[in-house]
Image (tube, helix red, strand yellow):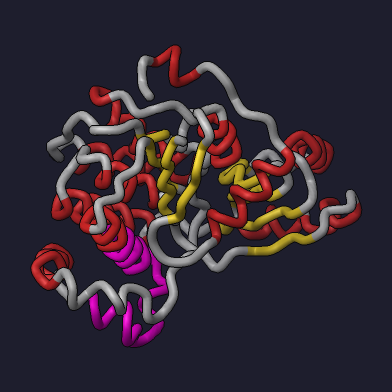
Amino acid sequence: MTSIYVFPGQGSQHVGMGVDLFAKYRDVVSTADRVLGYSIVDLCLQNDGNRLDRTEYTQPALFVVSALSYMAKCDAGVEPDVAAGHSLGEYSALFAAGAFDFATGLSLVKKRGELMSGSAPGGMAAVIGLTEDEIMGILRVEGANEIDVANLNGPRQIVLAGPVDDLARCKGPFLAAKAKNFLPLRVSAAFHSRYMTGVADEFRTFLSKARMHTPKFPVISNVDAQPHEPEAIVEKLVAQIVSPVRWTDTIRRLMSLDNPRFEEVGPGKVLSGLIRQIRKTEQPLMGSFDDRGAA
């Protein structure tokens, strides 16, 4: 059996997350407060002014709670053979693998959230019920060249990013093509798209100062569904900001391992639902682990 931990990204946050962990890991919580400059406990449990749903706060909060959840697993004597994370969750997976320490990971996530929240206005929307090929065909017909694919969450659950008006214009054609739903997301920018290029460039400067270590087990990159190579972690994390989250291919890659057992570590069960859907309809993506020498 291959034990696989997956770590959630934005959208899994909720008031009260981490309540059973904060008292157990007081020293780590103190480190988080020092790095962030505010109380992580107050953010997660009180959520004054709905801060928890603002990107600059959501990302650090999810990283902290996911990291504490992983620590609890380790304290119980359970560690994975391989890990992956959805967007922000990739930082939790890299922390779990020892690519950087807790304070470093949190400082990276804090900066990432600040940069992304301050990026140019834009939007995102989930198209449910159509394949990527069907979606791309409709975008071509509509001349919607300003829209990018941002998240490939499942074979028929795909998130688009771009200008809000362009996204809204495509709702009718998607529904006419028998999409089950078209759901605008509550975000302020077009994440994982060309519109994040400035953010990625600025983040590279910050990220390049961080000390990285060789992961102790493979961590799958969102960018290409391949295991991270130690010397390329920084560039992959920079590329992640402007590239689609290839979650379907990530799970297909992990499905090729011996008797894979997935476990979501952190708040919520969003990824568990996506994984069930992918395993039900998709075939394993073979070869990559052996080819890259990781497993």
* Residue 51 lies in the magenta stretch: yes
Q: Is residue 192 left or right of residue 185?
A: left
Q: Position of residue 280 (x, y in %)?
A: 71, 43
Q: Position of residue 173 (x, y in %)?
A: 85, 52
Q: Is residue 93 left or right of residue 125?
A: left
Q: What's the residue at 39%, 51% (across, down)?
A: 89
Q: Is residue 120 left or right of residue 168?
A: left
Most extreme residue toward the top, as rendered?
291
User: Where is residue 169, by image quadrant?
Assistant: bottom right
* Magenta span main SS: helix
Q: Position of residue 266 (x, y in %)?
A: 38, 61
User: Where is residue 15, by image quadrant?
Assistant: bottom left
Q: Is any atom of residue 114 visible in this view?
A: no
Residue closest to the eye, 92 or 198: 92
Q: Is any atom of residue 261 visible in this view?
A: yes
Q: Position of residue 256 (x, y in %)?
A: 55, 27
Q: What's the residue at 31%, 24% (across, down)?
A: 229
Image quadrant in which the C terminus is located: top left
* Residue 58 lies in the magenta stretch: yes
Q: What's the residue at 74%, 54% (across, down)?
A: 128
Residue closest to the eye, 226 or 52: 226
Q: What's the residue at 26%, 40% (across, down)?
A: 97
Residue closest to the eye, 115 or 50: 50
> What segment carries the magenta color?
39-67
Q: Is residue 130 left or right of residue 100?
A: right
Q: Relative to residue 222, is residue 67 depicted above or below?
A: below
Residue closest to the eye, 115 or 294: 294
Q: How many numbered discs?
A: 0
